[in-house]
Amino acid sequence: MSQLIFDHVHKRYGDTVALDGVSLEVEAGEVFGLLGPNGAGKTTLIRILMDVIRPDRGTISLFGQRHRRSHLERVGYLPEERGLYVKHKVLEVMTYLGALKGLRRAEARRRSLAWLERLELAHTARWKIERLSKGMSQKVQIAASLLGDPELAVLDEPFSGLDPVNVRLVETLIEERRAAGHATILSTHQMDRVEALCDRVAMIHRGRRVVYGPVGEVRRRYSLPEVRIESPDPLPALPGVERSAREGDGAYRLLLAGDVEPQAVLAELVRQGVRVDRFERVLAPMEDIFIRVVEGA
Amino acid sequence: MARINKIGVVTRFELESTVKRPGYLIATFGMPLFLLLYAGLVSIPAYFMTKKESEPQVFGIVDRAAVLGLEGSVQAAAIEVPPEVAAVLEATGQQQVLAQALGGDAGSVFRPYADEAAARRALAGGEIAAYYLLAEDYLATGRADVYFAADASWDTKGARGALERLLVEGLLADRLPPELAARVKRPIAASKSFTVAADGTVQPRDKLSRILGVAVPLGFTILLFISTMISAGYLIQGTAVEKENKVVEVLLAAADPDEILLGKLLGLGGAGLLQITVWLSMVLAAGIFFAGTLAALGVELPWFAFMLAPPFFVAAYFFIGSLILGTGSLGKNLKEIQQFSMIWSLLPALPMFFLGVLMTEPNGVLGKVLTWIPFSTPMAVVLRMTLEPEGIAWWEIGGSFLLMLAATWFAIRLGARLFRVGLLLGGARPRWREVLRQARLSA
């Protein structure tokens, strides 16, 4: 079931077109990567979802109904341009934001303490925000956005400022959300995180949706017909292979002719008695796809 | 439609955040404490001085002219004050204060001495503070010299006033009939002032009560105006905090701009109100202290104007506060926010600039025009109601209040839209065309 549907959404600021008929859907229980270069229109799209700004045209459906402000109680939001009341205590701010999201004050406080415990920040509950390190502050903000256990969470650059241990922690949180059937929109420039976490992606460029689909499918779509083979034996000449090269670790990288399936190459190797330790289709990394799309390749 | 629970959450947070601030606590409770401390420090020496002066002093009298005929020590007669003043003093328990102010010698005791040598011995022995010598030719010259001890302190005073009253008593006794003697001692015993109106009606004229009748409500109006401006100041600070901490987007994702705006207005307005309540309690204490005086003077306070003032000023706070929040949110930092909001803080002070004209002619053209400008409505209406209540029509009061409410509703709507636009234009300096366009889309 689609938790969120953008249907031909348009938005412009003065003479600048921020969104030009963007359509996309986010399903329940998936991690959806919202990608694009700076100024592409991602933040505008998110702000429209959060009803911070209104679209010029197009419709948005949330949880199977036409977008209404009351639906936002079920949406968590970590904006890119974010901050907290630096002169206030951590627990006060989290409780306030939880209460603002519709939780009862006592419940917001209880959940805040539980989240701080989970993020190993229980000792900071009575600290002023200004005393937190950048990473700590980042984790508090993520916790505040997920306090209400939202069915849909929008996390804009959640990994910025985090060390590898905390990156792993946030990844775990996102994976737990997926396991619980909750949808997460992940907006990030860290393409390795997209590959590791996202089920589907959409890339926005100059206000238009230029890439859209499951991560694996997108990567296959933008990949050359290449296979990578690890073998203790030298590879014989194979039909349908246009180019062969050795990589640093001794593996072979073969560029296939357009109409040749990788399975045919594997079958030929087996037929010729070549021992194969590893055989895989080489998929283009998301980072390459990102750069190719943005540079118009 | 704004949701009450969201407004309540924002209100509570803003109120708690503000009243916990050290600056707020110092301003709210520190100032009255400072004033109390100051008053205490000032009154301690005054208390001891008064106590010292209230102890009766003994003066010697050497009556060579034989006009007093004293046979033993005598206390000077008390000062006689006009009955209307006496009533006021009695009501406020201030008889002693006036007696001190008029002469300071009401408790002086005069002790007769047969000759100057006896008086000097008493002076040297510290039995008397000073002695008066009435010359033989006193009746012709009126000469009465006073002699102090060489070691008398600089502030040792004589008892000239008390002695004069004693001499008047002595000179008149047995010389005039009692009634005439009383008139000589006090030619005007009672007097009232009246004004004669053009139609011939006569009314009591009491300048002091009239001045107080204007000054008290005027002070009250100015206090309400100051409280509105203080609360507006908190709004400016609050907007700056959110802008500088980049919290607005998180808030807007959780609540409607109208809800945030109203919550802030209520929370920060409540903080301002609390501060003014603390300060007012001091004024009230002073008011209770002087209530008897005002009542005794027959001061007629314009209670209807007093009752009208709070709703007008509450509406004014929401009206001006919404505009401050809306335009203030277009600024990037405290300095810009103050610049953008300044105009809204200045406009309500408009009647203050024309106070002279309004005092002279409260129901003139200027007063009537200012009544219908929402920025100046509260002050104009309350001033007119205070100074010349018969000159303002009921429809002017009702109509201007309705206009004030309509303007407030419009200001809240506009403020909420600008608040949203202020966020979305983020770090960039907003262009008015874009602000208007976004405000239209926010509807």
Image: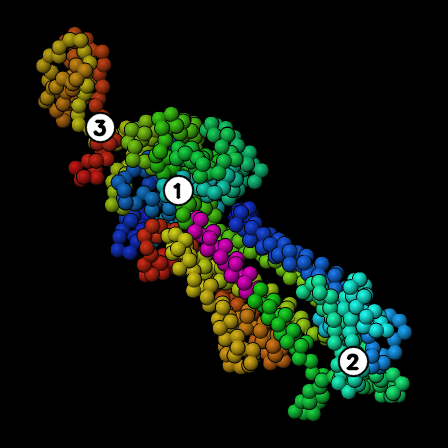
**Disc 3 marks which residue?**
A284
Q: Tell me the quadrant of the picture where the C terminus of chain B can be found.
A: bottom left
Tell me where residue B3 appears, x and y as whole percent. 53, 50
Do labels 3 and 1 touch, CB within 8 Å?
no
Q: Which mark is residue A267?
A: none
Determine the secondary structure under disc 3: loop
The residue depicted at 53 percent of the width and 81 percent of the height is B364
Mark 3 is surrounded, within 10 Å at the Cα level, by few (under 14), some (14 to 19) or many (20 or more) other residues, namely some
Q: Nearer the viewer, residue A137 or A248?
A: A137
Callout 1: residue from which chain? A
**Disc on the earlier residue, 3 or 1:** 1
Given residues B263 and A149, the one toward you in this image is: B263
Residues indicated by labels 1 and 2 sit on the same polypeptide chain: no
Residue A82's tag is: 1
**Most frequent secondary structure within the magenta stretch:** helix
**Image quadrant where residue A220 sits:** top left
Mark nearer the viewer, 1 or 2:
2
- For label 1, the crowd category at 10 Å Cα-Cα, with few meaning under 14, some 14 to 19 and many 20 or more, is some
Q: How is the image coloured?
A: rainbow
Q: Quadrant of residue A108?
A: top right
Q: Which residues are magenta?
A: B224-242
Instruction: Please tell me how many numbered marks the rendered image carries.
Output: 3
Q: Nearer the viewer, mark 3 or mark 1?
A: 1
Q: Is residue B41 visible?
A: yes
Whether residue B370 appears in magenta in the rendering, the answer is: no
Q: Residue at x 72, y 73 (%)?
A: B102
Under mark 2, the amino acid is Ala
> What residue would you read off at disc 2?
B135
Vertical arrangement, residue A206 with respect to residue B47, above or below: above
Amino acid on which disc 1 is placed: Arg
| Residue nearest the observer in this picture, B59 or A126 | B59
